[in-house]
Image (cartoon, rainbow, N blue to C red):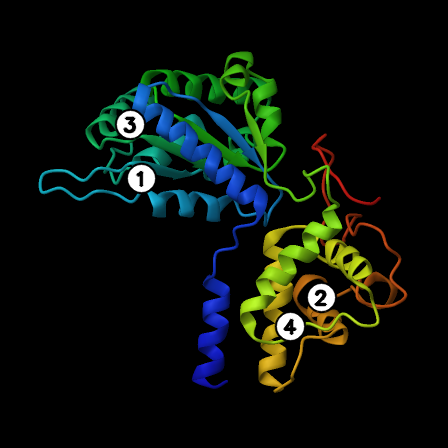
Amino acid sequence: MTPEIAERLKLFDEDLVAFAPFVAAKDAIEENLRLFRETEVARHMLILGESGTGKTSLCDWVERINPPIYHEERDQIRVLIVRVPPAVSIGGIAEAFLNALGSFWEQRSSVTAKTKQIILLCRKCGVELILLDEAQHLKDRGDTKSQYLIADWLKFLLDELALPTVMLGLPRLEELLQTNEQLRRRFSRRVFLTLGQDDAGSVERECLQLFTSLALPLNLPVRSDPFNNMDFGCRLYYATDGRIAYIKKLLFAAFRKALLQDLQAIDIPLLAQAFTEEIWREGIGKLNPFNEQFVFRSLDRGGEPFERAHTGARRRGRA
């Protein structure tokens, strides 16, 4: 691989994809942050999306817009991003907060002591916004009683801090709120990181527009023949489930192949190969969306790339 090809691939991989629901979620977070700065009123929200819809990238973008301010005596952490570990306990989430704050904590200290330290450090560091990424892990430990206790601790902490907080996670995060009515009331506002929320258009058309906008800076044309635009958009939707990470992964793989083989365009056979190699190795023949014999159904059954447990989450698109 030449240095020029490596650089082009690196730039494409690092490029932030600001699709419409992503921008709307960012704007909603910024609106809550402005409200807090102007009035000290803290409003919370829930941001839900399947894996690969950009939740972590959204956290990083908000932090990039509101970076820490470095002072001689103490740094101001305006946006505190807390990555929630899997199957976390109350003590574990308290430690995640302290790690995000850059604090050294005593291994044997009680949850009460850790909670007090979190509150103290958030105030001293001038935290204005809390982002809880991978928040679905808060409900993945123990039974309903355990989940209630975690939700109750979080409610207490947020009430004490009085800071706008955003929980970002998979759709099953909603189940945590069902166990604690008070926490559910605090996070009544919900934003979904999914395509297909615009009733004026189709999810397939949005998928095609997103793919096209990503491909435009590559200076390599995309040829969809023998499919027309609507057919191509529909196949893109099934190939990626409308998830930004998969759209980008598919295009990245095809772009890499085209550069290495010195091809003049990204075409349907190339996308078919990229789908099999990067998204689903069993996606061949009628199970490959870029094959003319494709069955035109969501690839979400057992063992398929977008298999999902029933969560009651909203889903648009074809059956």
Q: Quadrant of residue 80?
A: top left
Disc nearer the start of the sequence (2/4): 4
Disc 3 element: helix
Which mark is nearer the camera, 1 or 4? Answer: 4
Q: Which residue lies at the image location 73% right of the left edge and 46% below the top edge?
A: 203
Disc nearer the start of the sequence (3/4): 3
| Residue 188, placed above or below residue 61 | above
Mark 2 lies on residue: 275
In space, the residues marked 2 and 4 are separated at their CA atoms by 9 Å
Binning the other alpha carbons within 10 Å of mark 4 as few (below 14), some (14 to 19) or many (20 upward) gives many
Which mark is nearer the camera, 2 or 1? Answer: 2
Disc nearer the start of the sequence (3/2): 3
> Residue 38 at what x, y percent from top left?
31, 23
Determine whether, in the image, residue 124 is placed left or right of residue 271: left
Binning the other alpha carbons within 10 Å of mark 2 as few (below 14), some (14 to 19) or many (20 upward) gives many
Mark 1 lies on residue: 99
User: In terms of depth relative to the viewer, which is nearer, 207 or 102?
Assistant: 207
Determine whether, in the image, residue 305 is placed left or right of residue 13: right
In space, the residues marked 3 and 1 are separated at their CA atoms by 10 Å
> Residue 19 at what x, y percent from top left?
57, 49
Determine whether, in the image, residue 98 is placed left or right of residue 155: left
User: In terms of depth relative to the viewer, which is nearer, 287 or 113?
Assistant: 287
Quadrant showing the C terminus:
top right
Disc nearer the start of the sequence (2/1): 1
Disc nearer the start of the sequence (1/4): 1
Determine whether, in the image, residue 44 is placed left or right of residue 306: left
* Badge 2 amino acid: Phe
Mark 4 lies on residue: 254
In space, the residues marked 3 and 4 are separated at their CA atoms by 46 Å
Q: Are marks 3 and 1 in contact (CB under 8 Å)?
A: no
Mark 3 lies on residue: 118
